[in-house]
């Protein structure tokens, strides 16, 4: 049993990312106000003026530590935090920044995006866990606000929040959606961790795997099935978006 946290201090940091997951905190609306009553948010660049140096009871980190400065900052924050939580796909899987995973490719994109006088420093995009111990991960691009609430509420109650181990397909079935894969359309639901209530499929799109690879997901069988309905490169690109840092992806493609 974990120790109940009295009125814990919370910090929210962001590295290289789009800040969409932090917006989900704000989307909690009244619930955020309730949580603020039970906690003390002492560092949150996006929404508050105070920027305490710590220590912190619960620290959320959004984004991928791409630059040496971000990687150093991550190590310092880890030392000051009782619980470190990765917030969103960028932090948990490398996410969007990790789509370009070749250190030779990245400078080519820098040239296309930035003016020549600006010299970006980052050469690699890896999840937080490549640098420090991460206690919990809230997956998704963006995360589901209900999951943020669940993690904070359970930690406040002295519980250890559990990762979802059901695939998106289970939530998709609950929503009574027509199965894309059974109708020869690509979908990553069978190997993607649930928690989003099958949001995309319910909205008429496919699951592109933003919650990351589910525990015991059959990656090999997924590749085989997708290759039956689309070209192999399209399958690789689908899996590269949020699963490129998994050992299953590396085994299959690197
Ligand atoms: S996980 Fe998605 S929504 Fe969240 S910060 Fe990264 S790109 Fe933005
Ligand atoms: S549509 Fe996708 S997520 Fe839904 S059941 Fe079929 S494979 Fe699974
Ligand atoms: S359906 Fe798939 S891509 Fe869409 S939010 Fe859920 S996990 Fe992410």
Image (cartoon, helix red, strand yellow):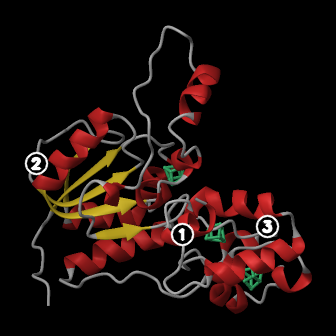
| Disc 3: CA contacts within 10 A as few (<14), some (14-19) or many (>=20) | few
Q: Do the numbered discs 1 and 2 sit on residues whose CB atoms are within 8 Å?
A: no
Under circle 1, the secondary element is: loop
97 over 244 or under it: above or below: above
> Along the line of sight, which residue is nearer the eye, 193 or 252?
252
> Along the line of sight, which residue is nearer the eye, 117 or 35?
117
Q: Is mark 3 within 8 Å of ligand 3?
A: yes
Q: Which residue is mark 1?
A: 212
Which percent across, then down, holds residue 215? 48, 83
Q: Residue at x 28, y 80 (%)?
A: 154
- Disc 3 or 1, which lies upstream in sequence? 3
Q: Is mark 1 within 8 Å of ligand 3?
A: no
Q: Is residue 196 left or right of residue 3?
A: right
Q: Is residue 204 left or right of residue 139?
A: right
Which percent across, then down, holds residue 20? 51, 49
Residue 108 seen anywhere in this rendered image of the structure: yes
- Disc 3 or 2, which lies upstream in sequence? 2
- Disc 1 or 2, which lies upstream in sequence? 2
Q: Is residue 110 left or right of residue 235?
A: left
**Which quarter of the picture shows residue 115?**
top right
**Which quarter of the picture shows residue 159?**
bottom left
Q: Residue at x 20, y 67 (%)?
A: 38
Q: Residue at x 54, y 42 (%)?
A: 102
205 over 180 or under it: above or below: above
The tag on residue 54 is 2
| Disc 1: CA contacts within 10 A as few (<14), some (14-19) or many (>=20) | many
């Amino acid at each position: 049993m974990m120790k109940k946290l009295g009125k814990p201090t919370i910090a929210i940091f962001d590295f290289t990312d789009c800040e969409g997951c932090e917006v989900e905190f704000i989307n909690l609306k009244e619930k955020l106000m309730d949580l603020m009553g039970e906690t003390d948010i002492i560092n949150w660049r996006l929404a508050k003026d105070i920027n305490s140096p710590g220590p912190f009871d619960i620290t959320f980190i959004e984004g991928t530590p791409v630059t040496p400065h971000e990687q150093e900052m991550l190590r310092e924050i880890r030392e000051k935090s009782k619980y470190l939580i990765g917030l969103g796909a960028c932090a948990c899987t490398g996410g969007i920044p990790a789509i370009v995973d070749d250190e030779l490719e990245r400078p080519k994109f820098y040239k296309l995006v930035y003016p020549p006088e600006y010299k970006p420093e980052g050469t690699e995009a890896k999840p937080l866990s490549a640098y420090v111990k991460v206690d919990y991960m809230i997956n998704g691009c963006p995360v589901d606000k209900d999951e943020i609430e669940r993690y904070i509420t359970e930690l406040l109650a002295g519980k250890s929040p559990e990762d979802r181990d059901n695939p998106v397909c289970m939530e998709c079935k609950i929503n009574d959606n027509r199965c894309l894969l059974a109708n020869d359309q690509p979908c990553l639901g069978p190997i993607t961790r649930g928690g989003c209530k099958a949001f995309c499929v319910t909205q008429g799109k496919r699951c592109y795997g933003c919650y990351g690879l589910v525990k015991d997901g059959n990656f090999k069988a997924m590749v085989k099935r997708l290759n039956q309905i689309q070209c192999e490169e399209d399958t690789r690109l689908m899996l590269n978006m949020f699963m490129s840092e998994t050992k299953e992806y590396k085994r299959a493609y690197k």
